[in-house]
Image (cartoon, helix red, strand yellow):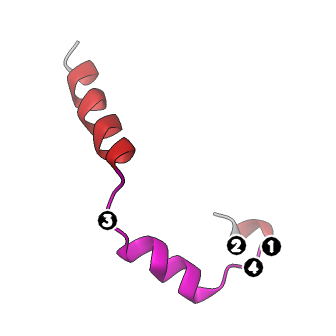
Amino acid sequence: MLTEHGIQIAPRTFYAWAERAPSKRALWDAAITEVLAGF
């Protein structure tokens, strides 16, 4: 998305992000989203 707007991103930055485990906040947000989707 950023590269579509002409913003350069170093490949190592992308791969570091892609290989990182999800944060506690991301896991919590996913759990809440599933709960709310049931309503």
Image spot of residue 13 (x, y percent): 57, 80
What distance separates the C-alpha of mark 1 from that of mark 4? 6 Å
What distance separates the C-alpha of mark 2 from that of mark 1? 5 Å
Queried whether the magenta region covers residue 11, the answer comes back as yes
- Tag on residue 8? 4
What distance separates the C-alpha of mark 4 from that of mark 3? 24 Å
- Circle 1 is placed at which residue position? 6
Of mark 3 and mark 2, the one earlier in the sequence is 2
- Circle 3 is placed at which residue position? 21
Q: Nearer the viewer, mark 3 or mark 1?
A: 3
Q: Which one is in front, 21 or 37?
A: 21
- Answer whether labels 3 and 1 touch (C-beta < 8 Å): no
Total count of labels: 4
**What's under tag 2, amino acid-wise?**
Thr
- Answer whether labels 1 and 4 touch (C-beta < 8 Å): yes
- Tag on residue 3? 2
Q: Which one is in front, 34 or 13?
A: 13
Of mark 3 and mark 1, the one earlier in the sequence is 1
**What's under tag 4, amino acid-wise?**
Gln
**What's under tag 1, amino acid-wise?**
Gly
Category of crowding for the residue at label 1, using alpha-carbon neighbours closer than 10 angstroms: few (below 14), some (14–19), many (at least 20): few
- The range drawn in magenta is 6-23
Of mark 4 and mark 3, the one earlier in the sequence is 4
